[in-house]
Image (cartoon, rainbow, N blue to C red):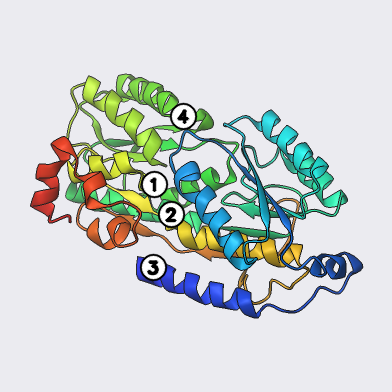
């Protein structure tokens, strides 16, 4: 399995940022030439999918906005909105972006398929669309995310490590993400690639809207169906759901059950250092946000993406979309210092509050 260190991710970001500054080729069509004439005075639309997961408002939005300002000498404007997990609302927000005549749109879709017509409407009005984090359907011009199959493999392999020789002694529960999110299918694919044939899956769920309360209800049902004495581990596709799962496990009197996660949310890091959650996937948001900003600015200015996007990704409605895929790493209690603290995502003071201080002291988190 490819396990890219955070330092590699940071290095990739540095290379990518340097590449953006050298991407001076103008596109060959009239629209590109007109866009290039805009220079730094561009308007970028930014649509994020929800605010239940901490990352979007705390990391993605400010990082993208800051990078766009940096790339345009502070002259660009960013129109922002959050869909709050409502696909219909997001479609209306795209319409508003079209009305406001943004030059380019960065879109993290609530529902990748449902947004297809909105993407087409934007493109018909000369607005190029950068798919962010999730590959939306429609004529997308660029895409940035993480290697999402690798995310699932990382989670699955971590769960196998946690189970050790007991991997076949009972059954695991698999709590996948929402079917409306194409990333969830890739996480699931990677997890199954790691787990199939090595564990017994007692129950598996696709969790509506990624909501922790839905994961909690599913876990309660799984405990009832499988039997609490037979459950040895839980694959959870993200940290929010892991929180709901762990609440259900505790209510059933179950402890020492390894649970995976993703996003390195603060609450998850705190659960990890106190052995309530086994791991999370740390995805460095800075290089992902930087890539989105770089591609959006280049597209708005009529420049080529060749020196920025080194990968190609296809969807059901677009082939060979220029893409930047950012590597990830497995976060456990043993590498908190070398991941989220080293990269400035959290400080030790933020993690080591109250009841978590003793665990931090034991692990040398500082």
Residue 151: assigned label = 2
The CA distance from mark 4 to mark 2 is 19 Å
Disc 1, disc 2: CB below 8 Å? yes
Residue under label 3, please give it: 4
Q: In the rendered image, is residue 5 in sight? A: no
Label 3: element kind: loop
Residue in view at x 77 percent, y 46 percent: 119
Q: Position of residue 21 (x, y in %)?
A: 62, 77
Lower sequence index among marks 3 and 4 = 3
Lower sequence index among marks 4 and 2 = 2
Lower sequence index among marks 2 and 3 = 3
Residue in view at x 76 percent, y 49 percent: 138
Lower sequence index among marks 1 and 2 = 2
Picture quarter with the N terminus = bottom left
Residue 262: assigned label = 1
Residue under label 4, please give it: 211
Please give left or right for residue 122 compared with residue 10 in the image. Answer: right
- For the residue pair 77 and 314, the one nearer the viewer reads as 77
Please give left or right for residue 122 compared with residue 58 in the image. Answer: right
Above or below 271: residue 363 = below
């Amino acid at each position: 399995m490819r396990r890219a260190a955070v330092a590699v991710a940071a290095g990739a970001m540095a290379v990518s940022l340097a590449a953006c500054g050298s991407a001076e080729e103008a596109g060959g069509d009239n629209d590109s030439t007109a866009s290039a004439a805009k220079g730094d005075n561009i308007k970028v639309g930014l649509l994020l999918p929800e605010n239940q997961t901490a990352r979007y408002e705390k990391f993605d939005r400010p990082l993208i906005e800051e990078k766009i300002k940096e790339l345009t000498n502070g002259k660009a404007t960013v129109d922002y909105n959050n869909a709050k997990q409502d696909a219909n609302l997001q479609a209306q927000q795209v319409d508003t972006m079209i009305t406001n005549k943004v030059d380019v749109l960065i879109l993290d879709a609530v529902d990748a398929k449902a947004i297809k017509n909105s993407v087409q409407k934007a493109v018909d009005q000369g607005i190029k669309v950068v798919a962010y984090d999730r590959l939306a359907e429609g004529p997308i011009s660029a895409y940035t995310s993480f290697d999402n199959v690798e995310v699932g493999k990382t989670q699955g392999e971590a769960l196998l490590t946690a189970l050790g020789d007991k991997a076949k002694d009972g059954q695991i529960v698999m709590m996948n993400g929402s079917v409306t999110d194409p990333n969830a299918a890739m996480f699931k694919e990677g997890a199954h690639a790691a787990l199939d044939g090595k564990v017994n899956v007692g129950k598996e769920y696709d969790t509506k809207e990624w909501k922790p309360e839905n994961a909690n209800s599913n876990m309660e049902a799984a405990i009832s169906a499988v039997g609490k004495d037979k459950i040895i581990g839980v694959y959870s596709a993200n940290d929010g759901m892991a929180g709901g799962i762990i609440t259900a496990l505790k209510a059933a009197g179950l402890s020492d059950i390894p649970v995976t996660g993703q996003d390195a949310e603060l609450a998850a890091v705190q659960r990890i250092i106190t052995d309530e959650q086994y791991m999370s996937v740390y995805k460095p948001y800075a290089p992902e946000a930087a890539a989105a900003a770089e591609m959006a600015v280049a597209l708005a200015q009529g420049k080529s993406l060749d020196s920025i996007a080194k990968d190609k990704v296809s969807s059901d409605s677009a082939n060979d979309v220029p893409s930047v895929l950012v590597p990830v790493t497995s976060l456990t209690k043993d590498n908190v210092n070398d991941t989220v603290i080293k990269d400035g995502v959290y400080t030790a003071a933020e993690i080591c509050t109250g009841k978590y201080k003793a665990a931090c002291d034991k692990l040398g988190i500082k």
